[in-house]
Amino acid sequence: MKRLLLASAFLIVLSTHAKLPMPVLDDAAQAKAAETKAKAGHVTKVASYQLCAVQDRLAARYGSTTHATATVVPCMNPGALVIAAAELKPNGASSAHSPPASAVPPLGTKVPSTAGKGS
């Protein structure tokens, strides 16, 4: 009985999780995710390089003759991680704001009248 309840609860959780939409990420979150992905990829490359270097040292130390006919690819150092900064728009160039000609001041602010002034 307990197994049946546990299995049904598990299926309910899975079905509700499957119906959830993917979260919408803003530009900052997308940039952060891309940076995290780049860092993870670089860590993987560095680990592969370090493993390759150790394997080369062990092969040189013990005189590996079993793979003498195989083509040997030299280890390539991935170098330092370089992440390009995202291009940022200045606040005035953002397309989210209305153009200056159609801008309306907020309610409750006094706007100077130009009707009473002579030219």
Image (spheres, rainbow, N blue to C red):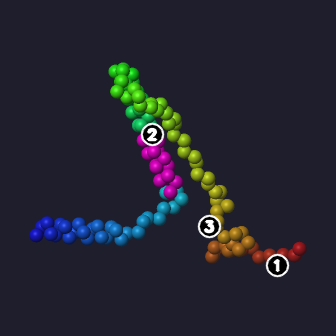
Q: Quadrant of residue 63?
A: top left
**Would residue 88 be found to the left or right of residue 81 on screen?**
right
The residue under the point 34% across, 68% down is 18
- Local SS, label 2: helix
Amino acid under label 3?
Ala
Nearest-to-viewer mark from 3 and 1: 3
Instruction: Indicate whether residue 39 is drawn in magenta.
Output: yes
**Would residue 106 be found to the left or right of residue 73 on screen?**
right
Q: Is residue 9 above or below residue 57?
A: below
> N-terminal of the two: label 2 or label 1?
2
What residue span does the magenta drawing correspond to? 30-45
Amino acid under label 1?
Gly
Instruction: Work out whether residue 3 can be spotted.
Output: yes
Residue 51 position within the rendered picture, expressed as x and y whole percent measured from the top left = 39, 33
Q: Which residue is mark 1?
A: 116
Q: CA distance from mark 3 to mark 2?
A: 40 Å
Q: Which residue is mark 3?
A: 96
| C-beta proximity under 8 Å, tags 3 and 1 | no
The residue under the point 81% across, 79% down is 115
Dominant secondary structure of the residues highlighted in magenta in the image: helix
Instruction: Indicate whether residue 61 is drawn in magenta.
Output: no
Residue 98 position within the rendered picture, expressed as x and y whole percent measured from the top left = 66, 70
**Which disc is residue 45 wearing?**
2
> N-terminal of the two: label 3 or label 1?
3
Q: CA distance from mark 2 to mark 1?
A: 72 Å
Q: Is residue 13 above or below residue 89?
A: below
| C-beta proximity under 8 Å, tags 3 and 2 | no
Give the quarter of the figure containing the C terminus. Answer: bottom right
The extreme right residue here reads 119
